[in-house]
Image (cartoon, coloured by chain):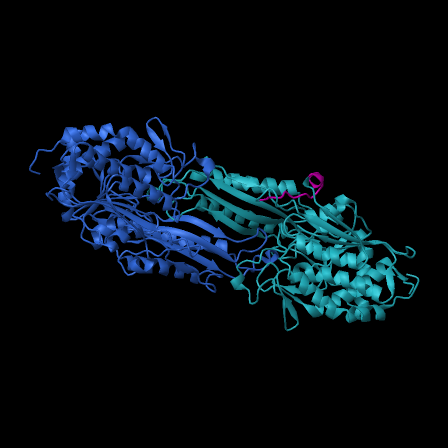
Chain colours: A blue, B cyan
Amino acid sequence: MTDPLPAESLIAAVDAGHSAQTRFLAEFVAIPSRRFAEGPAQDFIADALRARGYDVDDWRLDLADLEPLPGFGPIEVKGAGDFSGARSVVGTHRPRGPVKGRSLILQGHLDVVPEGPVEMWSTPPYTPEIRDGWMHGRGAGDMKAGTVAALFALDAIHAAGYEPAARVHFQSVIEEEATGLGALSTLQRGYRADLCVIPEPSNLSVNRAQIGVVWFKLRVRGRPTHVATAGEGSNAITAAFHLVEALQELEADWNARAAQDPVYGDVPHPLNLNVGKIAGGDWASSVPAWCDIDCRMGLLPGWSLEACKAEIVARIDAASRDHAFLSNNPPDVIWNGFQAEGYVLGADAQPGLDTLHAALRDVQGGDAPLPEHKMTALTDTRFYGLYYGIPAFCFGPHAQNIHGFDERVDLDSVARVTRVLALLIARWCGLNRLEG
Amino acid sequence: MTDPLPAESLIAAVDAGHSAQTRFLAEFVAIPSRRFAEGPAQDFIADALRARGYDVDDWRLDLADLEPLPGFGPIEVKGAGDFSGARSVVGTHRPRGPVKGRSLILQGHLDVVPEGPVEMWSTPPYTPEIRDGWMHGRGAGDMKAGTVAALFALDAIHAAGYEPAARVHFQSVIEEEATGLGALSTLQRGYRADLCVIPEPSNLSVNRAQIGVVWFKLRVRGRPTHVATAGEGSNAITAAFHLVEALQELEADWNARAAQDPVYGDVPHPLNLNVGKIAGGDWASSVPAWCDIDCRMGLLPGWSLEACKAEIVARIDAASRDHAFLSNNPPDVIWNGFQAEGYVLGADAQPGLDTLHAALRDVQGGDAPLPEHKMTALTDTRFYGLYYGIPAFCFGPHAQNIHGFDERVDLDSVARVTRVLALLIARWCGLNRLEG
């Protein structure tokens, strides 16, 4: 930066846009962008990017392009057409004036996790409602508010009479909640930058580290009998329970191992097994012949994904060998989503973190250290940092109940994040004053 | 019986009809008469009864008529219209000649349990196939072969030149596999007789006793959290597992009690808990907020249904009190199907049993005692015997894998049962020779 940073005018421009930003967010949250149904939400973002003059790339994902890439997670589709409409949208800013700074990717995912039984929500999940300064709705926190903050941070720079003096890719992706294939597709497509910032909800803190995650389905099948002789039969549901118990032992063992980890040693129980979904049997009075359980398990950064998967399979095999039914009907373990390694920020992230820290001080004053945390979940940052040499971290607003009922985001935190992102962009990319 | 019994000509007439009977059975098995979709199968039987000249009563069930009656089991319907097409069909024979014998109900149910994953069948479940003398198909054994045997036993009497010399109700019912409301509806409608015989698959043996059964759904609901903090959250699926463990303890306790029972003391493990169906959660990486488990539990004859249900609820309550999540989110226990007491044949059944025994000797010769057994499942006989003073028992062909894959019925046993039923009808009702 050779020019002095117009911090006050950028902050003023962000604040001037706050009401419009909140209305835009509400419109975005109202679109139920569940998996395999993200199309209208991607249209919403693509339209917004086009209206702002970005160079918009809007393409369909092709699994054949992605499968060879590191970090690929398999898609389990119910119908052949489920994934055929999957799209990524990238709006690119290339400076009209001289390139003075470093390039930047700002990425948001718009896929949301299922809302669950609607009756457990205080207000309907896709009817965003503001109460006590919080906007409620599925995806409001995770992570539509962050995506919109990035978009309006860029708007504020323009409204203040500037443009980023380096390339900026505003990337809207899907599949963050299941495989990460949306983020991976932007890298496959060739988008690169010197830094990637993802405004996932983080309560204005940076994720120094994140865990890896694998998804798998336990598929139990066996021959049932009449319920009158259930004792002779093979109950696929209770057999599946037996496998879950074996995985709970694995979870305990892995967390004991994690207590010795240099990064995660101070995080209590960082690795969580989640038995997230179950379906089995057809009839109360028929011994069930089938049961499927969808599981999620965490692993630490630096742990080999392949070794962890082999350990999961070994535990399932051992639990099956000592079980009358499973020993004759070994279950399948199907890897059907995240195949994600953990990720810890390296030294190459320091310039980006320093810039974020400076932007945070621009907005909040003081000289507190940059707040940071270690996540017990994962984000799309891993693809950038692990496989493409692009340092990537998250910094976003304050949200609650993500993946739960009454998910909500603190709108005041959204305003603060938007200010910080505007300053981060200005500091990282530099600014060109726009000619009237 | 004043006339000598024309046993040989009746048996010859049965055997002459065997090929037609097998073809008729295959057509019947080919109709997938699953719950709430029994209409075409009832049409098939009603048409067959009309073609034979029976007086056919074909009516829709009205739950309001049935709810006040003893033994009623609640219907859990997914859609409001599920039960609206439920029908019973009764074809009545009233003798043209003098009434000389005792009246008889012959009843079959045509509802079948779900076939489960089709790929686990050797041949498609509704494409009946005969291999090595067995007809394979869902419902072939339970109990379409028995129903058809009764129909063709009556046909053989006519083909031999006779009619039953007493009233015979041929009753085709539904819901035997879930509530018994079809059988109950015939009693509500007013059908009565001196004996009821149900040709359920029994390998030519009589069920001296049958257990009671209750169905219930455990409905677990609770607030989930992000999977990153699954430890804090409340996993409805694993909470449901905890409840199943409590029910397994109840099952063990009840079977210990059953070992002292005067009727069932010699039957190993007569009372089976079946966890028949489970569904919970929406997403591998969301802590599940809900889980439903459909259970079936047996109870002994003479045990109070209400006391058993209270004991189930007490066990669920106790298991919930010691569980962090369930104590704050007590599960619901929903009684949603069988509410059936056990039934043991009384002295009033002896004339019917003696007649069956005589018919069996007519067909098979010898002087072996009437084969009998104690069931660890239930049949519709309970409604007749317990609540309407009509002795009722089952006697039917040899079937395997009922409620399982590759269900099948031994066609030779079907032929033998048809002969015995023809002789049973002749002996119980008496015969009038038909005028040419």
Residue extending farthest top: A132
Kindly give the residue lying farthest to the bottom in the view shown.
B132
Q: Residue furthest front?
A: A436
Residue at the (28%, 34%) spot, across then down: A398
Screen quadrant of the N terminus of chain A: top left
The spot of residue B86 in percent (x, y) is 67, 47
Q: Is residue A264 left or right of residue B123?
A: left
Please state, as top left, top right, bottom left or bottom right, where the C terminus of chain A lies in the image: top left
Q: Is residue B425 left or right of residue B317?
A: right
Label the magenta part by its dominant secondary structure. loop
Q: Nearer the viewer, residue B428 or B28?
A: B28
Read off the magenta span: B64-77
**Residue A354: where, in percent of width, then height?**
13, 40
As for residue B404 lying within the magenta part, the answer is: no
Q: How many marks?
A: 0
Viewer-side residue, B279 vs A249: B279
Q: Residue at x 75, y 43 (%)?
A: B188
Rendered residue at 32%/54% (across/down)? A61
The answer to which image quadrant residue B339 occupies is top right
- In this rendering, does residue A264 appear at all? no
For the residue pair A70 and A310, the one nearer the viewer reads as A70
Which of these two is toward me, A422 or B152?
A422
User: Is residue A14 in view?
Assistant: yes
Q: Is residue B214 left or right of residue A292?
A: right
Q: Is residue A312 left or right of residue B46?
A: left
Up the image or down, A431 lies above or below B384; here it is: above
- Residue B262, percent from left and from top: 69, 52
**The quarter of the displayed image where residue B96 is located:** bottom right
Where is residue A63? Give x, y as percent.
33, 58
Residue depicted at 40% across the width and 49% down the height: A275
Residue B52 falls in image quadrant: bottom right
